[in-house]
Image: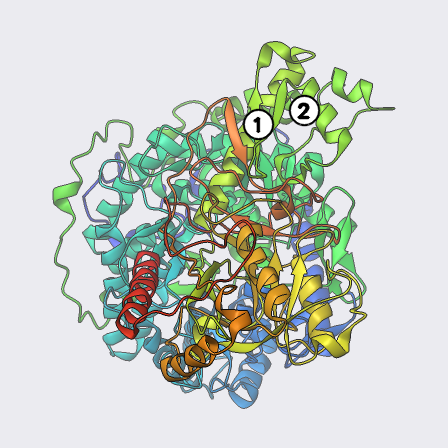
Amino acid sequence: MSGAAGCQGGGSERGPRWRRPWKLLALGLLSASSVLAAAPGAGAMSKEEKRQLGNQVLEMFDHAYSNYMEHAYPADELMPLTCRGRVRGQEPSRGDVDDALGKFSLTLIDTLDTLVVLNKTKEFEEAVKKVIKDVNLDNDIVVSVFETNIRVLGGLLGGHSVAIMLKEKGEYMQWYNGELLHMAKELGYKLLPAFNTTSGLPYPRVNLKFGVRHPEARTGTETDTCTACAGTLILEFAALSRFTGTSIFEEYARKALDFIWEKRQRSSNLVGVTINIHTGDWVRKDSGVGAGIDSYYEYLLKAYVLLGDDSFLERFNTHYDAIMRYISQPPLLLDVHIHKPMLNARTWMDSLLAFFPGLQVLKGDIRPAIETHEMLYQVIKKHNFLPEAFTTDFRVHWAQHPLRPEFAESTYFLYKATGDPYYLEVGKTLIENLNKYARVPCGFAAMKDVRTGSHEDRMDSFFLAEMFKYLYLLFADKEDMIFDIEDYIFTTEAHLLPLWLSTANQTISKKNTTTEYTELDDSNFDWTCPNTQILFPNDPMFAQSIREPLKNVVDKSCPRGVSRVEESLGSGPKPPLRARDFMASNPEHLEILKKMGVSLIHLKDGRVQLVQHAVQAASSLDAEDGLRFMQEMIELSSQQQKEQQLPPRAVQIVSHPFFGRVVLTAGPAQFGMDLSKHKTGTRGFVATIKPYNGCSEITNPEAVKEKIALMQRGQCMFAEKARNIQKAGAIGGIVIDDNEGSSSDTAPLFQMAGDGKNTDDITIPMLFLFNKEGNIILDAIREYEAVEVLLSDKAKDRDLEVENMDQKSAENDSHKQNSEEDTSASQDVGAVSEEPEEGESSDVPDPDSLSPAHADSDSVSGSHQDSSVPGADGAGAAEPACAPGDSRPQEHTGTQPSSKGSWDNKAQPMESILADWNEDIEAFEMMEKDEL
């Protein structure tokens, strides 16, 4: 997202110290004219070249904007490869990414104030008229509160801000009467239902027409949101309150920020990535300045700039001290655990942290801003664009690049802070790379893989809202602008809000509740907003002297020489084995592990354990790769334990002679019917499919139709199995583990993940049973043929009257009296496991669970305290596809089938049956309580 507005660099001999309010009227962007001139010979760019580059930016914008208007409008976004608009519901779902789309012409609204910054006032006037005439905000569609706030609400407010400015100038927009503000207020009210929580943190999604809790809303069941999602509201909501005089918007945004502040980890003063919106518990306890947290920090500082409330500055300074103490490892910014801030939580960085140097410019901490920016620029020079994520040794971790603007933003602010023409050259490189690698006939296409240069049919609205705005401002002189940019502050989406709002409609009391927590050592942070004459005293080469040691930081780490592992496996260098790609069934991977000194141990329950002995590695480089591989595997396992936790489900055998007394704990699926929302569950007779693995078209559809299909794990993805049985007419599916002897007695809950693709087409419920529990059903089929089960979120009450009648009938049936056994196999599954600590040994996730992109492996989610899961067969893939289940020691009630597999059903008094049943019910109630 976008960074901060700059600060005034001239004037006072010393800038304001911490916890001292700024005089907002003196704020604005630090003008390049206020900094020292570049040193002779520093390669200053001529004014003519700057003008040409500025015109080039205008031409690139025209190319993107005109293609959107011609081929996509009124759709939300342009698909530049197919030259058509992206309309939600008409294109395959992309998951959470599509939550930004609300059928409200997103790109046009997001681009409004960019048109004015780029001096396209006529186009702006036409665009505003289109928005007023065509855009409907009352759509029955579920959207992201965060994205709708920063892009649509922010876009409307930014458009209103520049519209009234142009109207005051007297040439354009004379007809304008606040229509955009009226639309912003309408949208603000549509977002307010999301704040209907006890904590004040908003739900992550809201239905524009029906809100959150309405039966038709299709949202409101979420429990978690990201810190940035809840903490990036104050600028837009406060501006809406200040513009309209309606205080409720600012009040709600402040309450959300207050709650996050109170829930920070007090010993480290850090916040996690994901928080429970009801309890305030941290769900993901890693902390950084990138995805999930980034704009929370940004908005604390900017809220102080815009609103003048000291508490926001004090909170920011508290967090910033913690960031520089724990997360900043110059030039890197590495995530840490909030409870163990000296322990890195990951070995890679995401591209969203590229905004942080720009925020540091606003803070006045220029040196680390220069260092981090230079490191990022070296990565860009290596790959042409900044990959979505890259490792600490600067290898590509996630290869996509959706044309994000954060690096351009920081480049602009560093140029404004230093006046160093080096940053103009950086901007020139960005322009050249966009035209050379991303430009297509119908716009600019996101990069699917920066290593191969492949494209994705995607041009996000933020590309027009931010990228061209920052690039144009980088090369524009003051006389090129039709208004003073220093009168505005940028939101995280680079929308413009006027600084005069600080004195408008102040209806919120500014009670300072932060001071008691801000007794910090500020000796390293003398100024909140720097005076450049003090920052660079008599040293115009200051910025260059900081950059110089980092010029080759990427080349020193990557590429590296060919290791013995690479030499032994064929011709030429190969990239090192990554944890996410590892397959325990791949002989080549096992050979690589051996060379890296990593041993693989198969445990009895089907899990695999990895142990590294560096002295056994083929070389020091191989030992280094082995250590990195182990760290990645631990991180991957820990990450899976924190994400997407689903409660266990129940498979209940309801036919004779069980009548619901056999309740098997089942692992859920992250696709298909959500049994928690279908209280009656799915009931039907079971049938074994052919082929038993379910990986191809079902050959006995007549036996499966209208029944619950039984199949074996293995050979393909779970989603593929589900599609095949659904096509055959099955009403549900049960996957039985193929690891002989695996049992819920000793193994954690499994969760079945999708295949990395859209799984909305799967509508039937799918559950997972371990081998032992699965055999209970298979044995029942062999004994009684017709076996009926109930798939549900928890055990249901039995039909005791029918059971009692059947028991009496069974007593008269001599061949049944000695062959039936009443069985109960319910169990209690607890809460999330502790995060594994780094070490030489790691029980690793099932390789199956790491394979969303391949079609030859199941994708399984599991959670252990030792981070291991059953199974070692399957293929790896580029991204983890699974999330953890539960891992606490399990308790289970009832008896298991005899070794002979007999089902001896002994007559019992009704009181005894009820007592046993109550135990089952209590166990599942406790299980549900633990999960909540």
In the depicted structure, whether residue 866 falls above or below residue 60:
above
Q: What residue type is labelled 1?
A: Leu
Mark 1 highlights which residue? 610
The crowd level at tag 2 (other Cα within 10 Å; few <14, some 14-19, many 20+) is: many
In the depicted structure, whether residue 159 falls above or below residue 358:
below
Residue 743 in view in this figure: yes
Residue appearing at x 78%, y 49% in the figure: 436
For the C terminus, the image quarter is bottom left
Question: Is residue 526 left or right of 209 when viewed as pictured?
Answer: left
Residue 97 in view in this figure: no
On the image, the x and y values in percent for residue 799 come to 39, 81
Q: Which amino acid does label 2 sit on?
A: Leu
Question: Is residue 713 left or right of 868 when viewed as pictured?
Answer: right
Q: Is mark 2 on a helix, strand or loop?
A: helix
Res 450 → quadrant: top right
Mark 2 highlights which residue? 593
Res 487 → quadrant: bottom left
Viewer-proximal residue, 877 or 562?
A: 877
Residue appearing at x 71%, y 27% in the figure: 590
The crowd level at tag 1 (other Cα within 10 Å; few <14, some 14-19, many 20+) is: some
Q: Is mark 1 on a helix, strand or loop?
A: strand
